[in-house]
Image: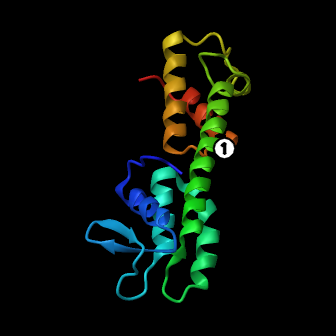
Amino acid sequence: MPDHPADPSLLAFVRAAAQGGRVWAWREDDHIAAGCQGPHGKAQTAELLTEVLREVFGRSAGDLARRALLEAARTSPDGGLPAALVRRVIDDAEAARSLLQGAAFGLRLRYSAVACGAGYKAVCTSLGIDPLALPAERRSELDEALRLQLALEPDTDEGRLASLLHSLLTRPLH
C-alpha cells in the first residue's frame, strides 16, 4: 500500500482501511471522504473508491478493482466495504499501474523514432519512408508525441500507438 499517497481522497481510504473493520465513503463538498464510521444514509463506497482509483492510478487500474468492489457492495446493506478488501484493491491498482507503465516503456522503445525501433521502422516502411532519412529533430518530436500519448493513457495498445505514429508521419510539418 502506498506510504504517502498524494491524493487526499486516496489518503482517506488508506487511513480508514488501516484501522480495520469496515470502510465507508461519501461525497463531502468538493471531495470524497472515507472513514470507519458510516455516514447517514447509504454510502456509495464501491463507486467512489473506483472513481478515486481511476483518477490516481488510471482507468484500467480502476476498472480492474471495480468488479470486486461492486460484488462486495452488492452484499453490503449499508454500502460499507471490508477494510481488507479496500487495502487489497488499492495495492492491486498500484501494481496494475506499475505493470502498465512497464508495458508503456516497452512500447515507447519499440516505436521510438530516435532509437529506430522495430515498430517505428515498420510504420515508416508501410508509408515508403526511409526510417533513417528523417532529421533528428523530427524523430525527437515523434518520440515526444508518443511519450505524451502514453503518459495520458498508459494502457494505449500497440495498434493505437502505430496508428498515432502513422498519422504523425503523414501530417505535414509545422
The answer to which quarter of the image holds residue 26 is bottom left
Q: Label 1 belongs to which residue?
A: 157
Secondary structure beneath label 1 = loop
Residue type at tag 1: Asp
**Residue 113's quadrant in the figure?**
top right
Q: Position of residue 168 (x, y in %)?
A: 54, 30
Of 93 and 101, which appears nearest the observer? 93
Which of the pair 118/167 is nearer the observer?
Answer: 118
Q: Total label count? A: 1
The colour mode here is rainbow
Q: Residue at x 48, y 35 (%)?
A: 148
Q: Is residue 31 left or right of residue 153?
A: left
* 167 in relation to 89, above or below: above
Q: Is residue 12 left or right of residue 17?
A: left
Within 10 Å of disc 1 (Cα), the crowding (few <14, some 14-19, many 20+) is few
Residue occupying image coordinates x 54% and y 51%: 1
> In the depicted view, which residue is nearer to us: 174 or 14?
14
User: Which residue is at a point 67% across and 18% down the rendered structure image?
Assistant: 129
4, 133: nearer the viewer: 4
* Relative vertical location of residue 68 with respect to residue 167 in this rendering, above or below: below
Check the picture and name the quadrant holding the C terminus.
Answer: top left
Q: Residue at the far left: name it.
A: 29
Q: Position of residue 19 (x, y in %)?
A: 46, 66
Q: Looking at the picture, does residue 120 appear above or below residue 157?
A: above
Spot occupied by residue 112 in the image (x, y as percentages of width and height): 62, 23
Q: Position of residue 68 (x, y in %)?
A: 64, 70
Query: Residue at coordinates 42% horizontally, 61% vertically from top-left?
Result: 15
